[in-house]
Amino acid sequence: GAGVSQSPSNKVTEKGKDVELRCDPISGHTALYWYRQSLGQGLEFLIYFQGNSAPDKSGLPSDRFSAERTGGSVSTLTIQRTQQEDSAVYLCASSGDRGKPQHFGDGTRLSIL
Amino acid sequence: GESVGLHLPTLSVQEGDNSIINCAYSNSASDYFIWYKQESGKGPQFIIDIRSNMDKRQGQRVTVLLNKTVKHLSLQIAATQPGDSAVYFCAEKVEGYSTLTFGKGTMLLVSP
């Protein structure tokens, strides 16, 4: 598609379950970013990919969070043993290179019961 | 009780007015700045950007002003329309780094 696509758009799960969130960046974009946005808050950086490698994963809040990117395209963000404080909107963005604006998907709204 | 985090700064304007949204950025080493618009249930949408070697940049109905001396960024929207109602975020990037640091956001409410 023309824009960044994220799936699922909504996810409700029980505390302790693992979840996997998917991001399809804009075709040809080499840089990919994951952010988290809690209700009424700004965006919190999680991890950055350049191609398939992650030179900056400083924003991952705990070792329950991990992400990978394959083929320089699709990325998945995995949260293991989810906690209620993980509830948020998880946003993915991509850009052509470091000097270009990041373009965002509409996010996955994650709710942990 | 209510969370302090839910109280975004809010700017209320009438349709047709000019709007000015302000942002104080944090890092004097930042060399690139972006304004995003976020509507309810949507991801942030790029509006306009500016590099630190400029102090003004204009787009369609929008102007961004950068004052590096006081680390201040503003977004001016001309002839504001109801469709401009959204939360607006400024973001900054430090030279040599790839990640953006976002501000808390300002809610713009436009009345017909």
Image (tube, rainbow, N blue to C red):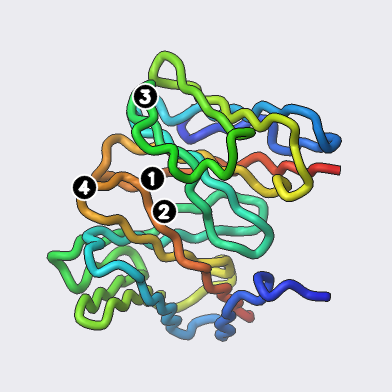
Q: Name the disc covering residue A102, or none.
A: 1
CB under 8 Å between discs 2 and 4: no
Spatial distance from mark 4 to mark 1, Cα to Cα? 16 Å
Using residue B63 as the reference point, say whether residue B21 is left or right of it: right
Chain letter behind tag 1: A
Question: Under tag 3, what secondary structure?
Answer: strand
Query: Which one is nearer the viewer's eye here, A85 or A22?
Result: A85
- Based on the displayed image, in which of its 4 quarters is residue B39 positioned? bottom right
Q: Do pointers 2 and 3 mark residues of a single chain?
A: no
Which amino acid type is marked by label 2? Phe
Estimate the spatial distance between the alpha carbons at disc 2 and disc 4, rounded to whole Å. 21 Å
Judged left or right of residue B75, residue A83 is right
Look at label 1 and name its amino acid.
Gln
Task: Determine crowd level at label 1: few under 14, some 14-19, many 20+ residues with C-alpha closer than 10 A.
Answer: many
| Mark 4 crowdedness (10 Å alpha carbons): few <14, some 14-19, many ≥20 | few
- On the image, the x and y values in percent for residue B57 come to 23, 68
The residue beneath circle 2 is B46
Q: Residue at x 56, y 25 (%)?
A: A76
Query: Residue drawn 59% across and 80% down?
Result: B10
Distance between the alpha carbons at the discs numbered 3 and 4: 17 Å
Which residue was labeled with disc 4? B96
- Marks 2/1 in contact by CB < 8 Å: the verdict is yes
Q: Earlier in the sequence, mark 1 or mark 3?
A: 3
Residue under numbered circle 3: A53
